[in-house]
Image: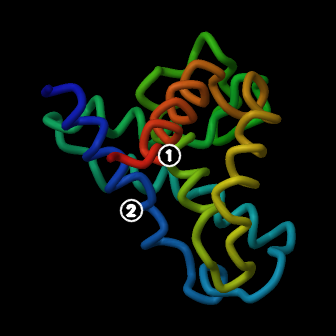
Amino acid sequence: DDRVQRIRLAGILHDIGKIGVPDSILGKPGPLNAEEWVQMRRHPELGARILSSHELDDVRDWILSHHERPDGTGYPRGLNAEEISLEASIVAVGDAYEAMTSDRVYRMSIGPEAARRELRENAGTQFDERVVQALLRALARESIPVS
């Protein structure tokens, strides 16, 4: 129960570092340019610095790593699958699903079915395959009508 609550807290706080990203970038109604991406990619490190309390060591590490990818192409540290904690992977998959199924200033939601497809297609490269499968199972249970 405690670990689940800590992961939930990380999910709530995962983008706290965006407080240090200019509003002009966060609310830009189109694609970001290279310099804007450099600034945006700083948000996990900024978030980790904001959460510098010893009591949040675990949460801070998960937030720092939530944009890392199993294939090693993520940021900020370019970690690969074995170096990324399960908790950071859970935050990453939850964040991605929420982002894809929500309207944003720069694009409309792609919808739940397309988001599920995107997660399946990128499982093992962008996302931890175990976490994707767990989320898809949970979403499938959720969509079954209860009589």
Question: Where residue 65 appears, x then y in whole percent?
Answer: 52, 35
Which quadrant does the N terminus fall into? top left
Q: Nearer the viewer, residue 20 or 131?
A: 131
Question: Where residue 26 appears, x then y in whole percent?
Answer: 60, 79
Looking at the image, which residue is at 47% across and 21% down?
85
CA separation in Å, label 2 and label 1: 16 Å
Q: Earlier in the sequence, mark 2 or mark 1?
A: 2
Where 143 falls versus 61 (above or below)? Answer: below
Q: Nearer the viewer, residue 113 or 25?
A: 113
Where 100 falls versus 92 (above or below)? Answer: below
Looking at the image, which residue is at 65% across and 16% down?
81
Binning the other alpha carbons within 10 Å of mark 2 as few (below 14), some (14 to 19) or many (20 upward) gives some
Looking at the image, which residue is at 67% across and 32% down?
127
The residue to which callout 1 is attached is 94
Left or right, residue 9 beside residue 114: left
- Choose top left, top right, bottom left or bottom right for residue 100: bottom right
The residue to which callout 2 is attached is 16
